[in-house]
Image (tube, rainbow, N blue to C red):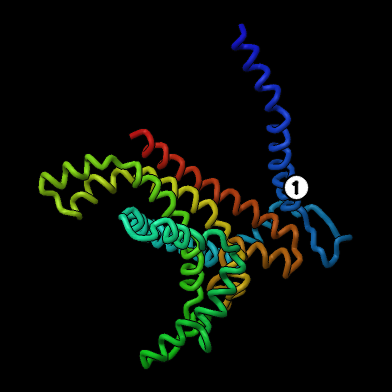
């Protein structure tokens, strides 16, 4: 009886927070859905009418739509490949005893705390600039011609910048998982004659599988909405070469002032994100059940 009362009291105390959270989530989504069926342009807000599915049809038939979808997938897959592989390598390195290990770990993790626009400006003006960037100086030192990264390889540049930001997160999660590995297993395998590659393949990598799955899940959700790095560096160009779905919605909303079309794009983005999250959650569930 006391347990039931305690549970009822706990639910009652949680109710305001849950209701506030639902309102905070549902109201913006409902407004976005409503505006997606309206002809509403900020240049002429008085001319407002019901558009039906015209906004969706307009957004879907936009020549940049499928390129934006492809660019979004390239950014997500490219960053995931770099951060997962690089995170595993850095985690293995940081797990080894070394002088100043704590300081090294802090330095490796610190890029994750840099704001995306600031990180993009650093890479744009100090590292990748074709005139006075670090990479341009290295190219000239080697007798090569400096590369204009944001003009010649815009999408690759975005992938590198975003991967640099998310690599510390993957490293931190994987390092934490690696430190929970029983040292006796590795010592027993080493005594049985297993070399480093075999120990990594049959002991370390299976142990890291859950952590890798969590990294992929969390990063994918955020990578689908990459925006600031594109705005600061390439502005979606040249043309639509580095425009992803989030930036295409921005162009529709704040450059064309088309609230209805941008809302339709937002609904499409939410649907696609939920589809991706559904598949990832199933993959995570299967992995965690092992």
Give coordinates of residue 121: x percent, y percent. Answer: 59, 74
Which residue corresponds to the image point at 45% horizontal and 82% vertical from the top-left? Answer: 135
Quadrant housing the C terminus: top left
The foreground one among 40 and 76 is: 76
- In the image, 260: left or right of 191? right
Which residue corresponds to the image point at 69% horizontal and 37% vertical from the top-left? Answer: 22
Q: Which residue occupies the extreme top position in the image?
A: 1
Give coordinates of residue 216: x percent, y percent. Answer: 44, 51
Quadrant housing the N terminus: top right
Which residue corresponds to the image point at 47% horizontal and 64% vertical from the top-left? Answer: 163
- In the image, 111: left or right of 83? right
| 215 w.r.t. 167: above or below | above
Which residue corresponds to the image point at 70% horizontal and 46% vertical from the top-left? Answer: 29
| 134 w.r.t. 77: above or below | below
| 4 w.r.t. 116: above or below | above
Residue behind mark 1:
31
- Mark 1 is surrounded, within 10 Å at the Cα level, by few (under 14), some (14 to 19) or many (20 or more) other residues, namely few
Instruction: Please indicate, yes or no, whether residue 161 appears anywhere in the rendered image.
Output: yes
Q: Tell me where residue 38 sits by quadrant.
A: bottom right
| 5 w.r.t. 235: above or below | above
Instruction: Please indicate, yes or no, whether residue 167 appears anywhere in the rendered image.
Output: no
Q: Which residue occupies the extreme left position in the image?
A: 193
Give coordinates of residue 133: x percent, y percent. Answer: 51, 83
């Amino acid at each position: 009886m006391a347990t039931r009362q305690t549970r009822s009291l706990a639910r009652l105390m949680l109710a305001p927070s849950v209701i506030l959270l639902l309102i905070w989530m549902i109201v913006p989504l409902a407004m976005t859905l409503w505006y997606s069926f309206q002809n509403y342009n900020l240049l002429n807000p008085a001319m407002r009418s019901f558009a039906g599915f015209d906004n969706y049809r307009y957004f879907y038939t936009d020549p940049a739509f499928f390129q934006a979808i492809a660019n979004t997938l390239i950014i997500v897959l490219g960053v995931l490949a770099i951060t997962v592989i690089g995170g595993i390598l850095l985690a293995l390195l940081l797990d080894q005893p070394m002088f100043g290990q704590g300081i090294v770990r802090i330095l490796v993790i610190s890029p994750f705390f840099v704001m995306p626009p600031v990180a993009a400006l650093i890479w744009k003006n100090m590292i990748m600039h074709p005139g006075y960037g670090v990479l341009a100086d290295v190219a000239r030192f080697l007798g090569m011609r400096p590369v204009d990264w944001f003009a010649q390889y815009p999408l690759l540049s975005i992938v590198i910048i975003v991967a640099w930001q998310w690599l510390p997160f993957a490293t931190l999660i994987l390092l934490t998982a690696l430190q929970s590995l029983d040292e006796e297993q590795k010592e027993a395998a080493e005594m049985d004659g297993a070399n480093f590659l075999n120990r990594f393949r049959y002991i370390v990598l299976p142990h890291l599988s859950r952590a890798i799955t969590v990294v992929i899940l969390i990063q994918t959700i955020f990578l689908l909405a990459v925006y600031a790095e594109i705005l600061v560096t390439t502005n979606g160009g040249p043309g639509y070469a580095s425009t992803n779905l989030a930036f295409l919605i921005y162009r529709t909303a704040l450059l064309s002032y088309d609230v209805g079309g941008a809302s339709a794009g937002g609904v499409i983005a939410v649907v696609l994100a939920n589809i991706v999250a559904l598949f990832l959650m199933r993959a995570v569930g299967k992995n965690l059940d092992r």
